[in-house]
Amino acid sequence: MRIHRQSAFISMVFLLLHATASFAFAGETDPNVLLKAIDDNLWSETKSIEGHLVIDNGRKERELAFDSWLEGREKGYTHYKAPPREAGTKMLKIQDKLWMYTPQTDRKILIAGHLLRQSMMGSDLSYEDMLEDTKLSSAYDAKVEKVEDVDGFPSLVLHLVARDETITYQSRRVWTDPQRKIILREERYAKSGMLLKKVDFSGYAPIKGRLFPRSLTFRDMLKENTHTTYHFDVIEFDVPVPEKYFSLSILKR
Amino acid sequence: MIPKIAWKNFYRQGLRAFLNVLVTALSIIAIVFNISLLNGFQAQATRNMVVSDVAGGHYLAPGFDLLTPTEWEDHTRPVPEVLRRLPHPEKAEILVQQGQIFPRNRLYPVQLRGVEMEQSLLDLPMDALKSQPAEPGDYIPAVLGTKMAEKAHLRKGDTVVLKWRDRFGAVDAREIKVVDVAYFLNPRIDEGIVWLRLDHLRDITRREGEISWVAVDRYRGPVEGLRFETVEELMADLLSMLKQDRRNSRILWTILIFLAGISIFNTQILNVFKRQKEIGTLMAFGMEPGRIVRLFALEGVYAALGALLVAAVLGVPFFTWFQSVGFDVTHLKETTIPVHEKVFLDIRPGEVAVTGVTVFVIMVAVAWLPVRRISRLEPTAALRGKAIA
């Protein structure tokens, strides 16, 4: 009986401490500053990524290996290497336009305007999602909503509201780790408030002074049993990217 | 004198003459049937398209192309005053946008088509939407066609998530409720389309007062900011298909006429060959070769006339009966051809007359061609039956 009381007391103290820390956590943090720090951690001048993409549509799983080079927020080039069916497929993004090259047709196709909203290669991402080049801190106003545990750690939940009517997702909710200045989870909402997408960030590892997630899992909440995971096997920041990678002439065999 | 002899000769041919007449008559009936069926098909398709979609033409937003869904959002316009002021029986405002529904958590791209509820120009089964309030409530009411409902596995009363973009590109999603599953005469406005109230669609996409096109009862002259497409332009694909069908039917027409012509041609050759002695005798009695040719040709004319008569005798009851049952085209239900389950003949007197006259002229020509050689026969050889080897 005594032991039982003791353990209850310890639990209460622990909870109290946890709540106090959480409130302090929530009270001290400026959400917009935190968002800016998160962006600074994620974004760099240039990036080169070697990775693979796993698309699970609930019935079948496909894995695509790719190499990507990114410059700022406006230029990106991805070359798919496997499987054989997708090998040689290339995507070039310059500002709001995306060109796709498939070796089967030996043609480059401009994916622009509303085509960008279609599902990318059957995944849970649209081309637009993939090309997203908006820094959260510049597109959204953040408010601290609550403190919530994510995998046993307290996380500060921010509610983001778009500053501009043209932003695709007018609101988001991000689960952040203010200490490490990273996002652990993200939810993207329709204007009506309906949850559309969930993104899980995992496997954070230090790379050149940054903490970068090794994998991102996207879930389209309007579909059932589907998810798409980006695995970043090799990431390099601020590496020189040959100018030819961002030229239309790269889109050929 | 000659007509009387020709009639006797024709009559004495018996079964051979009757079969010639019958084959030609059936060919005429088949040709008229074929042409009239195509007419009926075209008339029904056109009527269905006009009453349900095309009306007297569309004033479209420049650049709008129904076959390019990815650009629908880029080509909308406010309704010009001149069209907005038209009474409801004379115009129907339409707004078309892209959307995605998620029946059973599967993505299904759809066309969101908003139509104004007050319009009476187009015959659309929108009664269930008319009774809905102008502001969407907890759900957005929608009407689906039977084909669309079947493909999306939705029934009346079901709710499903609809995702779309507003005019600024922001993504939005809400539940829609299927308030009715209706039968559309025209499959082109059924499959892949979610019908909404125009005010609702404008509200959720923030496109107040905008349209993709305005259907009108007739051309109202040039309207600034919009381009006009005629009924023929809007139905170009269907008309082109029917035009091709008409071309194909001409091939059938030619084959039938050829067969009937061969039959008469063959009979005439046989007549000249078998009746050499008769020809020789007529020549010996002093009948000029030209008159003998006319005599034989006249027998062909009687066959052609007989064919027209038999075609009328057999054709009239056949066509009367056919009009009571129609031609079953239920197999076309799965296509986008806007016809009912049955097609009826559209018999045009002018076309029947042209067909009859054409067949008659061709029959007379093929009856005359083989008997021309009579004028070159030697009377003595003909009397012995050895003028033609």
Image (cartoon, rainbow, N blue to C red):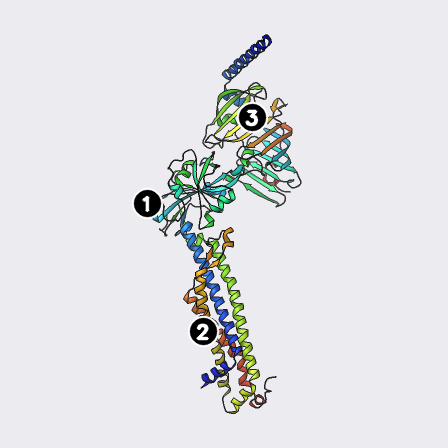
Instruction: Please rate how many residues cluster around mark 2, counting C-alpha atoms within 10 Å: few if below 14, some from 14 to 19, many from 20.
Output: some
**Disc 2 and disc 3: Cα gap in Å?**
87 Å
Q: Is residue A236 above or below residue B331?
A: above
The reply, left or right, for residue A56 in relation to residue B114 is right
What separation in Å lies between label 1 and label 3 (alpha carbons)? 53 Å
Of tags 2 and 1, which is closer to the observer?
A: 2
Q: Nearer the viewer, residue A253 or B51?
A: B51
Looking at the image, the residue that sits furthest to the bottom is: B285
Q: Residue at x 49, y 78 (%)?
A: B300
Q: The numbered mark 3 sits on a residue in which chain?
A: A
Residue wearing tag 1? B85
Q: Position of residue B288 (x, y in %)?
A: 49, 88
Indicate the amino acid at tag 1: Arg
Tell me residue B31's x, y (percent). 49, 66
Q: Secondary structure at mark 2?
A: helix
Residue under numbered circle 2: B309
Q: Which residue is mark 3?
A: A185
